[in-house]
Image (tube, coloured by chain):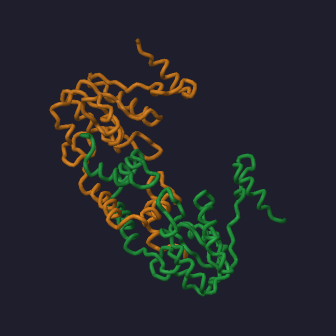
Chain colours: A green, B orange
């Protein structure tokens, strides 16, 4: 197309590869960046390159970290007998923000999804089982509340039965501020069957 | 926060500066990028840096270009007696995609918006008036159909009265595929008052 330059086209294509960003949004971002100074664009680009250069995966919990083992795994202030199993590093980030949990984590790196070719061998399940032999008392399964996350939790629960430890699953129910009227049937039936004493 | 690294924080902050991207989206993008290869991230970063290095503004129409004057301004296949005035380079891109218009463009670099401190001197209006002296026969005002765009079009129309050329404004009306039922009053009243003979 004559009306735009090759550099703009390439930048649009690269941005459109990101999740949730289509060609229209990518185009808007590019025209926004063109108005910014060279320094501002370089700061953005450098931050992205640094991501991959300085961020590694913790050899114990597979969370992202700059030093391996990570700060959580080496902390003396945390309960090393409790492991919370999550799918992705951003789940760790979400749980840490609650400031409620003081145990360790284990990041699976995804969830069981046979259609996408993700089986037990693609996840850090073997590494999780190895950790269980070192005095762990409770495993909290905090995989997502969708079909794949539930399947992964059920699979892990079965696998860990022989270890003789407490296995728990995070509660499903009505979210805070949620109206019963707008809750879907699955959520509401879960909230009913998993009701707790007041 | 202990659960994430400094490089991740910086990347999230840089991405969140982009329009339409909040902290949550920025976070999702960063975790997506962490899963990509170093080469893929570098391709993205390089494309952004190249943007500013290779993209300039055409000295005639102020559209973005790699060579100045731009390919449209120097083309012999286009009608040099017709100038379409738009707000931003992406508007040129949008009109070019219709494959309907064969004249030249003039990119104002925004629209009149006193509240944002954008007056006539911040736009390429003087440069537009200079171009009109070189045998231009028609100016098409294609600023956006919002309050600022309309004000800019009215201002330019008044300014160009003395040049004795045809000044037109792109049609406002019901968009293709639009239901009358869902059209707002302004659009519908415009569509009625600017009705054309079938």
Q: Residue at x 62, y 83 (%)?
A: A78
Position of residue B6 in the picture relative to residue B120 (left or right): right
- Quadrant assignment, res B72: top left
Instruction: Give how far across and how far down residue A28 sits, in percent.
Output: 40, 47
Vertical side of B68 occupied by B2: above or below: below
Instruction: Give how far across and how far down residue A93 sits, in percent.
Output: 56, 69
Instruction: Give how far across and how far down residue B98 sits, in percent.
Output: 33, 32
- Quadrant assignment, res B183: top right
Position of residue A145 in the picture relative to residue B34 (left or right): right
- Residue pushed farthest top? B197
- Residue pushed farthest left? B76
> Which one is in front, B21 or B170?
B21
Position of residue A69 in the picture relative to residue A34 (left or right): right
Q: Residue at x 49, y 70 (%)?
A: A121
Numbered circles on residues, count: 0
Vertical side of B34 occupied by B137: above or below: above
Vertical side of B31 occupied by A74: above or below: below
> Which one is in front, B66 or B107?
B66
> Which one is in front, A73 or A190?
A190
Q: Residue at x 27, y 44 (%)?
A: A4
Position of residue A77 in the picture relative to residue B197 (left or right): right
Considering the image in quadrants, where does the N terminus of chain A appear?
Answer: top left
> Which one is in front, A146 or B172?
A146
Considering the image in quadrants, where does the C terminus of chain A appear?
Answer: bottom right
Instruction: Give how far across and how far down residue B85 sits, in percent.
Output: 32, 34
């Amino acid at each position: 197309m004559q009306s735009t330059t090759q550099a703009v086209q390439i930048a649009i294509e690269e941005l459109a590869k990101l999740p949730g960003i289509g060609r229209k949004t990518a185009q808007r971002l590019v025209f926004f960046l063109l108005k910014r100074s060279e320094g501002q664009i370089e700061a953005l680009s450098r931050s992205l390159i640094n991501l991959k250069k300085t961020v590694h995966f913790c050899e114990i919990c597979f969370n992202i970290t700059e030093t391996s083992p990570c700060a959580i795994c080496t902390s003396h202030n945390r309960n090393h007998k409790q492991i919370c199993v999550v799918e992705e590093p951003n789940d760790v980030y979400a749980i840490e923000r609650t400031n409620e949990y003081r145990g360790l984590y284990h990041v699976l790196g995804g969830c069981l999804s046979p259609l996408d070719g993700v089986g037990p061998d693609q996840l850090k399940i073997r590494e999780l089982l190895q950790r269980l032999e070192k005095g762990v008392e409770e495993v909290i399964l905090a995989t997502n509340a969708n079909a794949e996350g539930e399947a992964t939790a059920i699979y892990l629960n079965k696998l860990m039965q022989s270890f003789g430890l407490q296995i728990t699953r995070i509660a499903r129910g009505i979210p805070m501020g949620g109206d019963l009227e707008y809750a879907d049937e699955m959520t509401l039936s879960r909230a009913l069957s998993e009701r707790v004493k007041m």
